[in-house]
Amino acid sequence: MKINLKRKRQGKTDYKARMIMLKSGKLRVVIRKTNRYLDVQLIKSEEAKDKIIVSTSSKELMKKGWPKNEEGSLKSIPAGYLTGYLAGKKIIEKENKKPVILDIGLGRNTKGSRVYSVLNGLVDAGVNIPHDKKVFPSKEKIEGENVKKGLKDLIKKIKGEIK
């Protein structure tokens, strides 16, 4: 009787998908959602070890001007877009236009989701990543106008501070 690997049994790793990504030899942009934040990492695999090159969390938006009273919304679609944009600027600074692939792990592949708002931010920052524009959230959702008025100006201000 065959016993599956521990992380596969726990539902944490899809080894087949991981192996396909590792065989490509490209850098991976890993997007993970926690209970409070969105995390974006640029990872390079070397000899069965993952090395983190760039790491960004939506928590960093607080330093860029995200309002303190909106701290609970740091995993929203607008915050995801800005986190992706911030991570994209860091990636361009370090790796300068090298092609990367998206790794969402076992996260759901849902059109217009927070993960794809992060991807939209990465693409707008200039990261060379294969994508289909159909999966991006609508402009209204990214600007947060469906949730709160004035968020569009805040996004422009924060985006201006990210260099």
Image: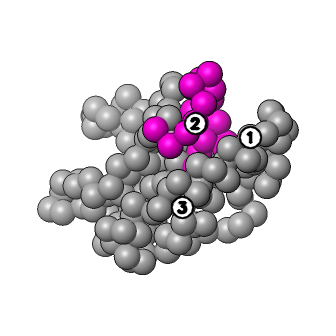
- Is most of the magenta stretch helix, strand or loop? helix
Residue for point 38% across, 42% down:
13
In the image, 97 versus 90, the foreground residue is 90
Measured in 3D between alpha carbons, the distance from the residue under mark 1 to the one under mark 3, in whole angstroms, is: 20 Å
**What span is in magenta?**
63-82
1 vs 3, front mark? 1
Could you tell me which secondary element the residue under label 2 belongs to?
A: loop
129, above or below 120, in the image? below
Whether residue 58 can be seen here: no
**Protein image colouring:** one colour
The front one of 41 and 126 is: 126
Badge 3 amino acid:
Leu
Q: Residue at x 50, y 35 (%)?
A: 62
What label does residue 151 carry, if any? 1
Residue type at numbered disc 1: Leu
Mark 2 touches mark 1? (CB < 8 Å): no
Q: Residues within 10 Å of mark 2 (few under 14, many from 20)?
A: many
Q: Is residue 144 visible?
A: yes
For the point 64% across and 36% down, the residue is: 76
Residue 34 x, y percent position in the rendering: 48, 30
123 left or right, relative to 110: left
The residue that appears at 63% across and 50% down in the rendered structure is 157
Q: Is residue 110 above or below residue 63?
A: below
Res 66 label: 2
Element marked by disc 1: helix
Residue 47: % across, % down: 15, 62
Q: Which residue is mark 3?
A: 122
